[in-house]
Every structure is written in structure tokens, then in C-alpha cells.
Amino acid sequence: MTSSGSGWAWYVLILLCLGPIAGYGQSADSLRQQANAIYRQQPAEALRLFGQLQKLARQQGKFDLAANGLVDEATVYYVNDDYRRATTVCRAGLSLTPLADSTRFKLWASLGEMYHQRNRPDSLRWFWQRADSLLLVRPALEREARTYVAAYWGNRGTASVEQGDYRQAERCFQKRLLLLARHTTPARQAIAENQFALFYRQLGQLARADSLYTASVHHYKTPDLNRGWLLLGLIECRLQRQRTDSVWVFIRETERLVKQAGTDGAELSAYLDQSLGKYWEQQQQLGRARTFFARSVATGQRLGGSSRVGWRGLMALSRIAWLQQDISGALTFIQQAMQANSLRFRATDPAQNPALADFLNGPDLFESLCWKAHLLYAAKTMPNSLQLASLTYDRAFALSDLLQASYSAELTKLFVQEKLRPAYREAVAVAYAQYRQRPDKATLAALLRRQEQGSAAVLRETLQALQRDYAGVPGYLLEEVQRAKNRLAAAKTAWAERDVAHSSGAGIVAVNAELVNAELVWNRAYQKLRPYTSVWLGTDNLSRLQQQLAPNMAFLQYSLTSDSLLLTVVKKNQIRVVPLPISSTQLNQLAETVRHEAYRNPDPFQYTGHTAARALFDRVLGPVWADLADVRRLVIVRDGPLHYLPFEVLETGQRPDDYLLRHAAITYAYSMDSYVRSPRQRPDGSPDVLSMAPFAVDQATLSLIQQRGYQSLDRSEAEIGSAVGTRSTAANASKATFLSLFPDHQVLHLATHARASDNDPGDSYIAFFPQDSSHRLYAHELGLLDLRHIRLAVLSACRTGSGSLHGGEGLLSLSRAFASAGCPQVITSLWNAHDGTTALLSQLLYEELASGLPTDVALQRAKLRFIEQQSSGGAFSPPHFWAHLVLMGTNQPVFPVPGPWPTGWLAGLGTGLLAIAGYIRYRWRRSR
């Protein structure tokens, strides 16, 4: 068994693989029915009956029947934890011929699951790829072998959860539900609830997981080991929620089921011991906890290397030793845990780590490495502890990159990055401690590299894929990938608009089914493309950054560590790393206060954010302010709660309203890598501007947009009026119009409504004129567009710069979606601002851009001119009315610098004037 929650993976196979085989004659059916009735109580007799079935089928030349019998026989070994014998028997079925496609699928799918239980990922992949390929060419198998195909997707989902590929797991579980939608039973219902409970528990949605575990126990009443595994999942979930008062009734029932099962219940007994250990650990009775964990490890050793129970027990013992302040013992146990999760690693020296690919379960090894690095960082008196901690983190993050390369869904990658954030932060702390011990170029480079590892890693991969040369990829594969990507985008759009476009339940079910199938097809295409891609190995971005910085520029990177906030200042000829004098509590409080005051409309109230803005400035910029005396342009990479802040509103306190805006133009970068790698070129001629205001409507059209849930944006037409070029308003500003026109323009300005989704960033959208239900441009659709030719996108729609905050990735906003499509710089809005002030700011912005200024400087000057136009203490002087527009990405000029008239033009003009003067003189003389 691989985890307490995945026990149902094998139950699916038992329940479904031992069903009757129709059409093979009464004798075969009779033998199978007898074996099915006794295989749990009398496995030896069941195997004897299956042997008779084998003999009979071979004598009659029914080799397909014989192969099915071998699947059944292998399943009996499988449910008794004899995975090796089960594999041998099942492989024997592949040697028989001829075989029906359905039989071959059963053999391949079953062998994949057996190798899954044996922790043989390469063999697992090989057999499941063949089963998947067969489903692709023979989709009718979903009807012919429905229950086996459903079991296959359920087992694949469980394996995906264990490998950390959560989106793929969810889609596999949903595929299983779709296949069995009209063939449900209480047992199958319990299977589905248990699988989704495991999924949500891994995501940290414990209340939802708890309700599903409870439902699964309710639906499965039979007092056997299968119910025991369900109860164990509920116990683990309750312990994770620290609801220890409610677990004992479930523990007692599980103990009775284990005792009833005898030796067959050994693995469940070991996992139950671990649950009891966690219980006593939460009660702070560490001695009792250690006893139960040690007992589970001993059981795991008897079960052999196919079980994760030993690894889990050793990890728990290491944690208990740490809590007892026994770091040496904790390190000993963690070395043993890594041995239990490795094929070849047997080193006991803490300086040694397993090879990158030497693991039985990748996420388990990653967890072990991170815990070991944490212990080494804490072992202050141990020689070379910092160096060993750093090397261990190197191995952990290399393993993480290897694992994430197989994830096809952005949501999975984002979630994994969120889970990795604590490890990244402590790794930065380790690197900074090494830098303080020996401040030289090597330790500084290591610190910057560590900071970069955890910054916008998913966006970095997306941009690399956009810029990758696929010259070596077969054309048919590129076409398959593009078709899969298009299908997935269409399915996501249909799903996002399902409540509008489909009023019937059947229509919504069809939309859901298409989304599941499209995601599975995309994953299949993505895996085929993997051999042609490479993992990011990191580059020396520092030297490239310093080459790109002008003398009046500085690059500021904020990095939250496990115990501090670091600020790295990079200038043309200077680098400085400073720990800032602010605790995490102070940072959160001050950032939230400044954010609240800037975001809210102060009219008719007064703006009251000055004190917090000065206090935050003193802590996050004050310590390096002297170093920035000659700096007029800042590029800032934010972290944590700083992502929500426009730094422009911070105040120096030297005089009233002395905003940082008055001292520097500001660009916000996603990471050093994204800023350095963005293409830079001087604008070749003035750009063609496409500006759209879909909700600048007259009274005749107002009722239509209101019926669709929108309000008019009366000043948006004036806003886009300042942009010279193609302008579209109202019904002319449709989604279809935008998609047809944007390839021929280099600047985009969208003054419209938008929505940022906190659940799925791909569901965020920009609204165009609502002629029909498909008027929204979703973030996932932007992934199909190539915006690398766009010089600047201005998204003045409300909250296009906001979204859910993911650790290391920043705000998952619409502006980030434009960046993912290759747009180098985006001006976006952090909050819903006054549309009249936004119109004036846009007019001033384009006036400054037209003079050839870099975009950051142009935006700064536009804001300063806006403030100057307000009377002292005027209604629109608070930051709410001008600080919402921020620049993300790079800071390149959009328009060429207007130069003096060319010499040829001046010479031509002079010649023309002389000719005119000569003609006038000639006529004057004639007239005399």
C-alpha cells in the first residue's frame, strides 16, 4: 500500500477485475463464480479454481479466456500484497495469442498498477503508456471494458496524487466518475469519495476532505479491511485538523478490523500505529509517540521495500528526535528514511545524499531532503553545517525541477511552487548566512541564484516555452500539441461560461466531460513533447543585469526568508544585500494598512495613510536610501505582502506628501530572470495603437449591457481618445474585432471591465462588448496568442493587476497572463479607480510616451503632472486616484525619440525657398 488514502486503489482492481467474463460458456463462468466467492477467505482454493480455468481454456484453444483468467489470478496475489508474484502471473498473460484489445488493455493497466505498488516508476509508465495508447486508437474500449477502464483512471489518479500532479489526479478521478455515471453502487460511490478526499487533503482543503471521508465510511458498511482503510483516511484527516477528540471511536473500530483480518491487516496496522503516534505527539507525550512510530517502522521492514510505511515512520522518528532537541538522532533517522526511499543509497554519513534519479517516490525524497537541510541549518555547532545544508537544498530543488517537468497543468505547478515556498525561503536564509560568513563573489552569486530559484519559476518556464526553438520536434507532434492546446482552451472557455450557455443539466454534464477529456488529451501531448525540452539550469543573470542598468537605475529584490526580509540592491557598479529591520508581523500590518488606504476612495473622507506609508518606507527603503541618492529609476521585485503595494505611495517624510513617486520612476519585475531575458530593441518607427472601449455606450445600448450584468464606463471613450490609432467603442469593440486586429498593432489599450479569479487564474477575463455569451477573453485563451510583437499593453480595466497571491509567483493577474503570452511591458490597474481620473492620466501618459521616453519615466511624469493639476488638497490628489496604474515587466520606450529634421530635408527646404525668392524677384523686375 502506498498511503492510507490510496488503499482503495487496489480495492477498485479487486472489485472490478473479478467480475464475470461474458460469452465464454457455463463451465468457465462456474469456475470464476466459485473463485470469486471465496478468494478473500480461501485464497489458496481460489487460486486452485483459477488454475482449473486456465487448463480448461488452453485445452479449448481459448487463449483470450486464459489471459483473462491470469488477470484474475494475479489479482488474488495482488490483494494479498504479493506484488511480485502478481506481476509474474500477469506478464504471463501477455505471452498468449491471440488477445482481444480489451484483454490486452486489462493486462497492461493491471501491470502498471502492480509496478506502481512495487515502486517501479519506469515500468509503471511503460505499461500505462501502452494502455493509454490503446484507449486512444480504440475509444470503444470505454464501453466494452467500462469497469476496467474506470479502475485504470482511478489508479492513475492515485499515482498522480502521490507524485504531486494534483490537476492530473483530479481529472483522472473525474474521468472515472464519468465512465461509471450510470453504473454507480454504494461501494463505487465510496471509492470516488475516498479518492477525492485524498486529493483535497493533499491540497490542504481539510474540511472538504473530512466530509468526503465521512461520506465514504457511511456508504461502505461491510466490516472488512477495506472499511478499515477508509476509517484510517478519516482518522488522518481529523488528526491533521487537530480534532483529536473525535478520533478514538474510529481508532477502536479500525483496531477491531485489523485484529479480525489477522496477518492480512499488517500494513493497515502499521499505518494505524503512525496515526496513534501523531495523536500522542499532538498531546505532547513524545515518548509514547516514539513507541508507536518505532513499531510502525518494524512492521514496514517486515513488509519489505514495496511499502511507504517504513519511510513515513522514520520521518516521524526524526521529527520526534528534533522535538527532543536530539539533532544527531534526527539526522540519523533522516538518513535511514532516505535509504528506505531509494533503490541504491545506503550511506549513513549526513554529508551524503541520494543520486538525483535514485528514488522510489520523488515527492517523498524531496520532503526528506528539505527536512534534512532544515536540521543541518539548525545544527550550528556541526562542522560545515551551512555548506551541507546548501548542498542538500541543491539536490532537493534539482529533484523538484525534474518532477515538475512532467506536470502538464499550470495549476499543479503553481500549487507545487506554493508548497515549496517555505523550503525556498529557508534556502535563501542558508545562502545569506554563508554570505555573511564569507562575503565574496562566490557566496554572493550563490545567494542571488537561490533568490532567483523561487521567483516566478512557472512564468519563467512559460516564457522559455514561448521562445524555444522546436526545430528538432517532428511536425506531426507540433500539430498534435497545438490541436490539444486549442481544444483545451475551447473546453475551458465553455466550462467557464457553462451556466450562461447551457440551461439544461445534460448540457452542463457534456461541458464537464469535454473539459476532463481535453485535459487528458493535453497531458498526453505534453508528455510526448517532454523529450524535446530541457530543465532550466540557471544562468549568471547578475552580469547581464548590470550591463543593462543605466547609471541612474537600481534593481531592488525583496526576499522573505524563514526569519527575515532581505533586500538586494544592484546598481551599475555596486551590489549590496541588507537584512531589513522589520518583523513579519510588522510587515503584514503596515503593508495591509497602506494597501487599504490607497485602495479605498477617500472621498468624502480624508486620506489617512501618511503615517503607515512613512513607517513602511523607513523599514523597507530607509536602510538603503543613501545608496539610492543618485538613482532616478527603480526596478523592483516584490515578495509576500509587498506584491499588493504600489511603492509610489511610500513617503520619505522629508516634507508633506513626499511620495517615492517624486524621487523615482518605478517598474515592477516578476524576477531578475524575466527582466534580464526580455528582448530589448529601440522602437522602429511609431507604433500602431489599437484602443478599445466596449462599454462606452449610448442610451439605446445601455439596457443591453445592463442585462448582461455590466455598467457603462462613460469616460472610457475619452480615455482611449488620447491614443492615436485604431479606436473601437461599444458594439465595434467586440472580442472578434480584437482578435482580428491585434496582430497588426504594437500598442494595446483596453478600457473595459475585467474580473480576476482567485480560484483558477485561467478563468480571469477581460470583457468586450457583450454581443453574445462568448464576449470574454479569458487568461487561458491569452496563452494561445503570441504577443511578442506588442510593445506595450495598457489594461486600465478594474483590477487587472490584482489576483490571488501565490508564493514565489506573485499576483496571478491578467497582466501576468499578458506577460505569459510574450508582452514585454504592461500597465495595469490594482483597484477600481475613478474613470475620469484614469482618462486624464491616459492622456498625459500618451503625451509623455510620444516624446520617446521609457515607459516607466513616462508614467511617472504623467502622474506628477496629474498631481500638479490638482489644487492643494484637491479631491483627486490622494494616491487612490493616480497610484492604481503600475508598470509590470520591462521599461522600454514605445515611441522613437523625435529627432531634428534630417539634413536632406533642410537642404531641400532651403533650395525651395531660394527658388521661390528668385521667382518673386524675377516677377518684380518684370513688373517694373
Image (tube, grey):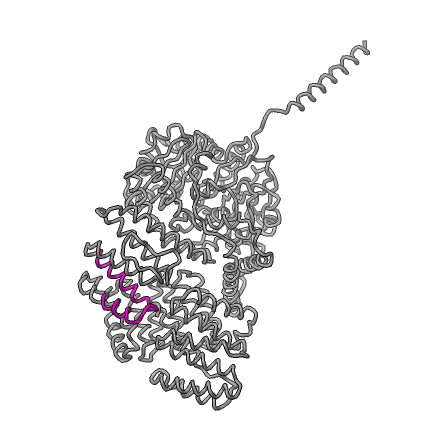
> Is residue 303 shown in magenta?
yes
Residue drawn where x is 32% and y is 76% of the image: 227
Please give the range of residues in magenta.
294-322
Q: Is the residue 871 above or below the residue 727 in the image?
A: above
- Write down the quadrant of residue 867 in the picture: top left
Q: Is residue 604 visible?
A: no
What secondary structure prevails in the magenta region? helix
Q: Is the residue 552 above or below the residue 172 in the image?
A: above
Towards the viewer: 443 or 545: 443
Left or right of 98 on screen, residue 443: left
Q: Is the residue 402 above or below the residue 121 in the image?
A: above
Q: How many numbered circles are shown?
A: 0
Residue drawn where x is 27% and y is 54% of the image: 349
Pick the quarter of the image with the C terminus. Answer: top right
Q: Is residue 294 visible?
A: yes
Towards the viewer: 720 or 818: 818
Q: Position of residue 272 (x, y in %)?
A: 27, 70
Residue drawn where x is 33% and y is 72% of the image: 230
Q: Position of residue 395 (x, y in %)?
A: 36, 52
Q: Position of residue 791 (x, y in %)?
A: 54, 40
- Write down the quadrant of residue 923 in the picture: top right
Q: Position of residue 373 (x, y in %)?
A: 30, 51
